[in-house]
Image: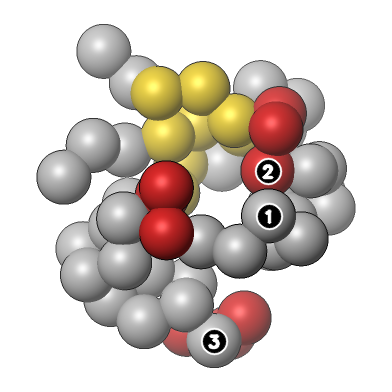
Amino acid sequence: MKTYICTVCGYTYDPTQGDPDNNIAPGTAFEDIPDDWSCPVCGADKSEFQQQE
């Protein structure tokens, strides 16, 4: 699975970890996260994330 980075604060979404504090289970691909999810660190919209190379 691919990781995505917040272009605002640098937080990395790792699908193997998920975002349990926001009810995103480990193993959830970034594409499968609801569109209203936001960065757990800075609150940026999901659209502010870019796939890491």
Please name the residue shown 83% across and 53% down the image: 43
Please name the residue shown 31% across and 55% down the image: 29
Q: Nearer the viewer, residue 21 or 30?
A: 30
- Marker disc for residue 46: 2
- The quadrant of the image that shows the C terminus is top left
| Direction from residue 35 to residue 17 in the image, left or right | left
Label 3 neighbourhood size at 10 Å, few (<14), some (14-19), many (20+)? few
Mark 1: secondary structure: loop
Sequence order check: which comes first, mark 3 or mark 1? Answer: 3
Please name the residue shown 31% across and 38% down the image: 3
Q: Nearer the viewer, mark 2 or mark 1?
A: 1
Alpha-carbon span between mark 2 and mark 1 = 6 Å
Label pair 2/1, CB-CB below 8 angstroms: yes
| Direction from residue 27 to residue 49 in the image, left or right | right
Q: Which residue type does callout 1 highlight?
A: Asp
- Marker disc for residue 23: 3
Q: Which residue type does callout 2 highlight?
A: Lys
Label 2 neighbourhood size at 10 Å, few (<14), some (14-19), many (20+)? some
Q: Is residue 10 visible?
A: no
Q: Nearer the viewer, mark 3 or mark 1?
A: 1
Total label count?
Answer: 3
| Direction from residue 1 to residue 13 in the image, left or right | right
Sequence order check: which comes first, mark 2 or mark 3? Answer: 3
Q: Which residue is mark 1?
A: 35
Mark 3: secondary structure: loop
- Quadrant in which residue 18 is drawn: bottom left
Alpha-carbon span between mark 3 and mark 1 = 14 Å
Please name the residue shown 51% across and 61% down the image: 33
Q: Which residue type does callout 3 highlight?
A: Asn
- Quadrant in which residue 48 is drawn: top right
Sequence order check: which comes first, mark 2 or mark 1? Answer: 1
Q: Is residue 19 above or below residue 47?
A: below
